[in-house]
Structure formats: structure tokens, C-alpha cells
Amino acid sequence: MAKGTPATGWAAKDPSGVLSPYSFSRRALKDDDVTIKVLFCGICHTDLHIAKNEWGNALYPVVPGHEIVGVVTDAGPGVKNFKAGDTVGVGYFVDSCRSCVSCGSGHENHCPTLVLTSNAVDYDGATTQGGFSDVLVVDQGYVVRVPEGLPLDGAAPLLCAGVTVYSPMMEFGLNAPGKHLGVVGLGGLGHMAVKFGKAFGMTVTVISSSPSKREEAVERLGADAFLVSQDPEQMKAAAGTMDGIIDTVSAGHPIVPLLELLKPRGQLVVVGAPSTPLELPAYAIIGGGKRVAGNLVGSIGSCQAMLDFAGKHGITADVEVVKMDYVNTAVERLERNDVRYRFVIDVAGSQLGAAA
């Protein structure tokens, strides 16, 4: 794409978080870049935080979106991995320094100067614009291939929600058949953890403060059991039974009761991002040698492996597909947790150019 060619997107223009049609320019196509026509883009809770500047880091106008599926329309002369017509994905980040310890060990998602897909400053000084737009230009090293046969709308959230739970399950050995996995929360991340856990052959228990989610978890998603986290008797009966727990909840909550569910040397992985600090008394992890870790999405390699696994097992997110003219309503509903389980924008079907 020629330098200065306008693209169109949906941007938050002020701290109110209201999204509006917006025209902007993409960078010139470099040797290792691919141009991607965006087909679908998920709406992540992170997009809501940034659009409303709840973390105080919004670079207005913000074009959100980092759960992106599209088709390659052009490729620079140095591109060897992709060609026009390939179906691809772009996730949480679009570049890294490529020289630090994390980048050198295949964990570029932990690079200290990671360039996020949206609302970040690229190495050339430009502000990155995300997938609420018709076109992306991305270095081939930060693009993944979407397997044939996966519904593209349901595949889009895999680029963030999917890899965020898959990556720590692989890293911490929470992928072995017969192991017992606890999943805290049944939202965008939680329902993906249930699906991956069952595909790995694990026993999966959903832990939720909402008893009304029992039928959804067990009958529809296939979880083996359901615990009401606010029921002391249920929690006591399940103490010491789980090999690992994936905690997906983004609101403040106590974690000591969750640690009590773990077997000795069990692993709790925090992937939600509460705005309030977690309280962790030393006694809760010293006894039994229990461990607490965090995880930020996954590396490019992990993301590709996750997509390949999802393609083999037919795993996609449960989504509600909307057009761009519904984005503000979708964001309002997301703030109320009124979605099962991910909004996905049909970008290509939304006539973005006409809207702008």
C-alpha cells in the first residue's frame, strides 16, 4: 500500500469512549510487510478499558482491536511466508525489539518494548491503529496463518482470548489427559479455557460466583463440574482436588480460597486483570508449595500452535457478530457483561469507507 493511502476505522476520540468513523493513514509497505484486508475483529475488554481511558494511557484517537482475522492482499518483496489470498490473523502485538532475552528465546510477548496492535507507539514513532479498521499493514513475523475450515468470525477471538489461556496451559503442564483443571469465571477467556481443557482430555471444573451459570458450563460447554465460589461447603468439599487453575476474572476477588482448591505443588495462573491488587498471604502458598503465575497472551509460535490445535479439534469462540454501526451498543453491553461470550465485528461487511 502506498505511503499516505487513507484507511478507515472506528476510533474513540475522547475520554467518553464514544466510537466514531475515522480516517487515518497507514505506513508504507516495507519489504517484510503484508497488507491485510480485515474481515472480522473481536471486541476485547481491553479495548473498552483503553477507549474509555480507564488505565490513563489512551492515545486519542484510539482505533481499537487486536483479535483480527483477514486476507492478505499484498506482500513486500521480502515476504516468504504469505501470499495474496492467504487467510491470516493478527493478535495483541505487531512488533518487538527482536534482540532482548525474551525475543531471543521465543517469548516475544514479554519483550519490554513490545509494540501493541492498538494504542501503542511503534518504533518509527507512529501510533498503532488496530483492527476496528478496513486495512492493516503488519510485518510477516507477527502474522499467523488461520487453518482452513475454522469459521472466521469464531476464530477471531482466538487471537487474544484463545492464546491467553492456551499458552499457560501448555507452559505449566495443564494440558495432560486426566489432570483436573479449575477455570475461574465463564466469560470470553473462561469459556475458551473450558473448551481447550476438554480437548486436552482433562477433567474441568468451572468456578463462578454466579450459580445461574451452572447449566451453561456443564450442559452446553461440557465442563465436568461446577463450583459456586461463595458457597463455603462446596469449596471445602473440593479442597485439594485440582492440579491447576486458570483465573480469568477481571474484577477484584479473593484468591486464597482458590489456592485452597489446589493439590500440593498446584499452579494458579492469573490471566484476568483486576484493577485492584490481589491479596496473597504467605501462608497460602508456603503450605503445599503452591505456585502463582501470570500470563500475557502468548508468543507468535504459541499463537500459531494454538490455532493449529483449534483447527484440528474444531475449537472456536462463541460469538455474537455485529456490524460497525452497532459498536457503541456492543461496548455498552460488554461493560454490563451482556454477551455470550465475545462480540465480533463483521468489518468487511460494514462498508467502512462509506461510513467515513
Image (cartoon, rainbow, N blue to C red):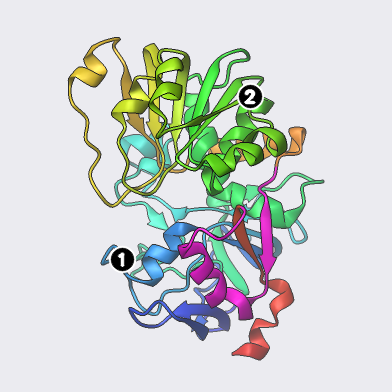
**SS for callout 2:** loop
Q: Position of residue 305 (x, y in %)?
A: 62, 34
Q: Is residue 115 left or right of residue 278?
A: right
Residue 321 sits inside the magenta stretch? yes
Q: Position of residue 5 (x, y in %)?
A: 57, 83
Residue 92 sits inside the magenta stretch? no
- Tell me the quarter of the image containing the N terminus: bottom right
Above or below — where is 293 with respect to 79?
A: above
Marked residue nearer the N-terminal end (1 or 2): 1
Foreground: 135 or 170? 170
Q: Is residue 220 left or right of residue 102?
A: right
Q: Is residue 133 visible?
A: no
Residue at 53% over, 67% down? 333
Foreground: 197 or 60? 197
Q: Which disc number belongs to residue 119?
A: none
Foreground: 306 or 281? 281
Q: Residues within 10 Å of mark 1 (few under 14, many from 20)?
A: some
Q: Which residue is mark 2?
A: 224
Q: Is residue 64 left or right of residue 318?
A: left
Q: Which residue is mark 1?
A: 54
